Image: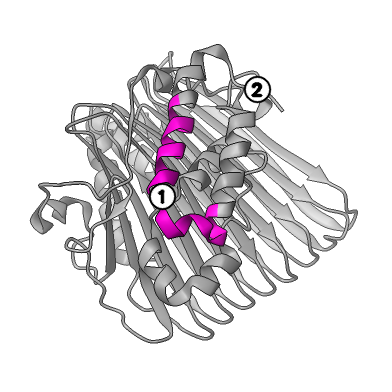
Amino acid sequence: MDKISTENIDLKIKLLEDFNNLEVNLNGESKNNIHKIRQDAIASFEELGFPVKKMEEWKYTNLKPVFKHDFKTVFEPAKTQLKRKDLEKYLVEGLKVNLLVFINGQFNEKLSSIVTRSEKIFIGSFSEGRISFNDVIEKHFSKYADYKNRSLTALNTAFAKDGAFIYLKKGVQVSEPVHILNIADASADSVMIQPRNLIVAEEGSDIKIIEDYYSLGDNHSFTNAVTEIYCAPNARLDRYKIQNDNDKAYHVGTTQVQQEQDSYFSDTTISWGGAITRNDLNAVFNGTNTECHFYGLYLLNGKQHVDNHTLADHKMPHCYSNELYKGIIDDKATGVFNGKIMVREDAQKTNAYQSNGNILLSEDATIYSKPQLEIFADDVKCSHGATTGQLNKEEMFYLRARGIGKDEARILLLNAFAGDVMDSVKIDELREKLREELSKKLIK
């Protein structure tokens, strides 16, 4: 295990002190099982420290710029001036949703609204969910996201106070999506927030989740988020993560999915904002006949940096995974894609596919693409590949010859390139909003 470098030591010490202060104010909560996990997690973080570039998994992502700022860690609900009308630009017009709003990692009940109500469903904050479903939370909390060997997951686990908790009992199908809106408000101070989400879909249940991240203010923000998802047998879950921060925001998001027999999980991750972004998405196939889809789109300019790390861990036979990530990179921006398919010895009859495509729009744009296969079974069908290039000159000429302007032709081709990722979004209203946002961002 790599220890912390000297550049990081001040922030590490500050966070360890903050944890001690947090414990002082927990009162009776300090004796429950969740806090025992927190204590174990902070010990892991103290040993591991922050990730550094000499670690293979962080080879192309340098977090040093993050450690230059004096972040205020947030434990109490933020005093916000935001009104419901201020959130409209973040919402999907015409879409009826269960809205959960978190300001600096803390649930804001006044800005939230729940439209799906049933004894078989809980949609709300983590802290509120512990009142009625503490047994469910203790059964699943921190059982999937690895805090023993991943320092930022350990840090989030240690400071896990609030976030979204979604629980569906057996056979429940939710027609209205859940929209988790996370806003980092750095108007007054540079802030570090640690959202923790837990989604439990019992047997035969079905739900769609939108998980958004935005940032406000002139100071810097560092969001270190962890989402754990459990899909019981025959459960179906579609998740859409949109990360659209400002240029003073840093974002690390870890999503860990546990899939049981005959379950279905699909994830679409859109990254087109923020200074440094790291998305870790891992799914474990813990039952036969499971199906999983990973889609990703990253649109970068300026000096933005986005790193997507994925893992499809095939532990059981007769499972299927499909992965498609695409990047559009301009100016001096940098993209990283590291996707791994792991096929373990017992995972016979596995079908697993992975593809990463990139378009570089400038000579200074950079992509590091590393698709990986690790196969320990012999009766499998697996493939992976990566492509990097520029806009097709013949296609540009074809469009220009038909009277289409240069900029418009460029936008048409880039929209077409991103089209199959956009098509993975099964919520019509959300898909149209994302397409409009993409077109706006492509205008130079």
Q: Name the residue that disc number 1 marks.
A: 419
Q: Distance between the residues labelled 1 and 2?
A: 43 Å
| One can see residue 381 in this view | yes
Q: Which residue lies furthest to the right in this view?
A: 378
Residue 225's spot in the image, x, y percent? 44, 45
Tell me if residue 27 is in the magenta stretch.
yes
The residue tagged with tag 2: helix, strand or loop?
A: loop
Foreground of the two, 122 or 210: 122
Residue 429's spot in the image, x, y percent? 27, 63
Residue sitting at x 42%, y 77%: 132
- Horizontally, residue 253 falls left or right of residue 102, namely right
Nearer to us of marks 1 and 2 is 2
Q: Say few, some or many: other residues with alpha carbon within 10 Å of mark 2 (under 14 / 14 to 19 / 20 or more).
A: few
Q: Quadrant of the N terminus?
A: top right
The span picked out in magenta is 14-35
Mostly what secondary structure, the magenta segment?
A: helix
Q: Say few, some or many: other residues with alpha carbon within 10 Å of mark 1 (under 14 / 14 to 19 / 20 or more).
A: some
Residue 211's spot in the image, x, y percent? 37, 55
Q: Quadrant of the C terminus?
A: top left
Quarter location, residue 153: top right
Q: Name the residue that disc number 2 marks.
A: 3
- Horizontally, residue 369 falls left or right of residue 320, namely left
- Horizontally, residue 81 falls left or right of residue 273, namely left
Quarter location, residue 92: bottom left
Residue sitting at x 58%, y 27%: 49
In the rendered image, the vertical position of residue 102 relative to residue 100, given as above or below: above
Residue sitting at x 16%, y 51%: 89
What kind of residue is marked 1?
Answer: Gly
Tell me if residue 64 is in the magenta stretch.
no
What kind of residue is marked 2?
Answer: Lys
Residue sitting at x 32%, y 75%: 176
